[in-house]
Image: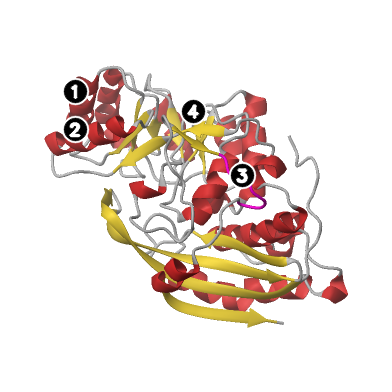
Amino acid sequence: MPIARPAAPVRLDAVELRVVHLPLVSPFTTSFGTETVREAIVVRARTAGGDGWGEIVTQQAPLYSSEYTQGAWDVAQRFLVPALLDAGSSASGGLSPEDVSAVLEPFVGHRMVKAGLELAVLDAALRAEGRPLGEYLGATVDRVPSGVSVGIQRDPAALVDVVAGYLDEGYVRIKIKIKPGRDVADTAAVRDAFGAIALQVDANSAYTLADADTLAELDRFDLLLIEQPLQEDDIVDHAALAARLRTPLCLDESIVSAKAARDALALRAAAIINIKAGRVGGYLEAVRVHDLCREAGVPVWCGGMLETGIGRAANAALAALPGFTLPGDVSASSRFYARDIVRDPIVLEDGYVRVPTAPGIGVEIDPVALDDATVARVELRR
């Protein structure tokens, strides 16, 4: 399902980058560690037709992936932004959002940076045209079911209490983080407490194939899926593990592109795919992963990276595509932040979040909140 109508090119005059620190409403613990403050990079694309906004979803340390904030900050300024400014000059005829990935392709990796830059250019172009991102990507619904990701808690009883709160708020799917020693008992506690809720677990690469027997114990809990149990490059081992489990395996960190998704499906290493635009290099590549999986009859859902309101709004638009048949991690902004950097943060309505309908990503920046969260700022011009 290719983009029906490409966006018009924009003349890129400058790119502003900001490192922001947003305190989380509660610590978020996974097998990688615990976050109390979300560090990310906000991108502002200044064009002749107005500004566009994007978000680079790196974290402070290279734990989830090899990308991290200071590395992203450096490569964006040294290489990626100058390449876009050159390509987006008036002399070149401007920069089409669909051409951003090609301009940046010579630079190996750094997919999260590329995704944030692409989104900012895309937002500027669509705002100038008065087109919402959802319409541009191919959204078919005006709201999407919202799941919530629950970090590892002090003990199973504390986990049950936290899950109860999110169910009371109306979330339609619960995902709990697991790691060795905090897996079977935690999952059993949630299943026993809440019966037949939509429940899945996320290992964030914490296991090896030697742990197959432990992971097989999770089969009895009727889970939607087990997400990324093994390391991101263990595609063959994931295929071997999938053959030993009844519960569907879902890949997250392993899916860094449409090609990676195609390879994983060919090896039967996954029955479900988690799509994160930042991880695959942008929303247009995310659409390509979606289209590939939809053609193969493989369900997909939209994962989250603790985005600010910028990325959260864009994720809602992405999750409205027809192949996203499982609830994703597009939760309300208040799940993570007492104060977001957009004026109208994403909210939960009867278990759903609305797909923004205003032009571009569909949200407006709160300049005071953005300034208060900013710890570093730079603007690059041609």
Closest to the camera, between mark 3 and mark 4, is: 4
Three-letter residue code for mark 1: Ala
Measured in 3D between alpha carbons, the distance from the residue under mark 3 to the one under mark 1, in whole angstroms, is: 36 Å
Measured in 3D between alpha carbons, the distance from the residue under mark 1 to the one under mark 4, in whole angstroms, is: 23 Å
Q: Is residue 359 magenta?
A: yes
Q: Which residues are magenta?
A: 355-361
Residues at marks 2 and 4 touching, judged by CB atoms closer than 8 Å: no
**Residue beneath disc 1:** 193
Q: Earlier in the sequence, mark 2 or mark 4?
A: 2
Q: Nearer the viewer, residue 364 or 163?
A: 364
Please report the residue visible at 68 percent of the width from the left and 64 percent of the height from the top: 104
Q: Earlier in the sequence, mark 3 or mark 1?
A: 1
- Specify the quadrant of the image occupied by residue 289: top right
Mark 3: few/some/many CA within 10 Å (<14, 14-19, 20+): many
Q: Look at the numbered disc 1 and give the secondary structure of its residue.
A: helix
Q: Is residue 340 above or below residue 254?
A: below
Measured in 3D between alpha carbons, the distance from the residue under mark 3 to the one under mark 4, in whole angstroms, is: 16 Å
Measured in 3D between alpha carbons, the distance from the residue under mark 1 to the one under mark 2, in whole angstroms, is: 7 Å
Q: Look at the numbered disc 4 and give the secondary structure of its residue.
A: loop
- Specify the quadrant of the image occupied by residue 11: bottom right
Would residue 329 appear left or right of 185 to someone viewing this image? right
**Residue beneath disc 4:** 326
Q: Look at the numbered disc 2 and give the secondary structure of its residue.
A: helix
**Of helix, strand and loop, which mostly describes the magenta segment?**
loop
Q: Is residue 248 magenta?
A: no
Would residue 28 appear left or right of 263 to someone viewing this image? left
Q: Which mark is residue 160?
A: 2
Three-letter residue code for mark 3: Ala
Residues at marks 1 and 2 touching, judged by CB atoms closer than 8 Å: yes
Q: Is residue 173 above or below residue 335?
A: above
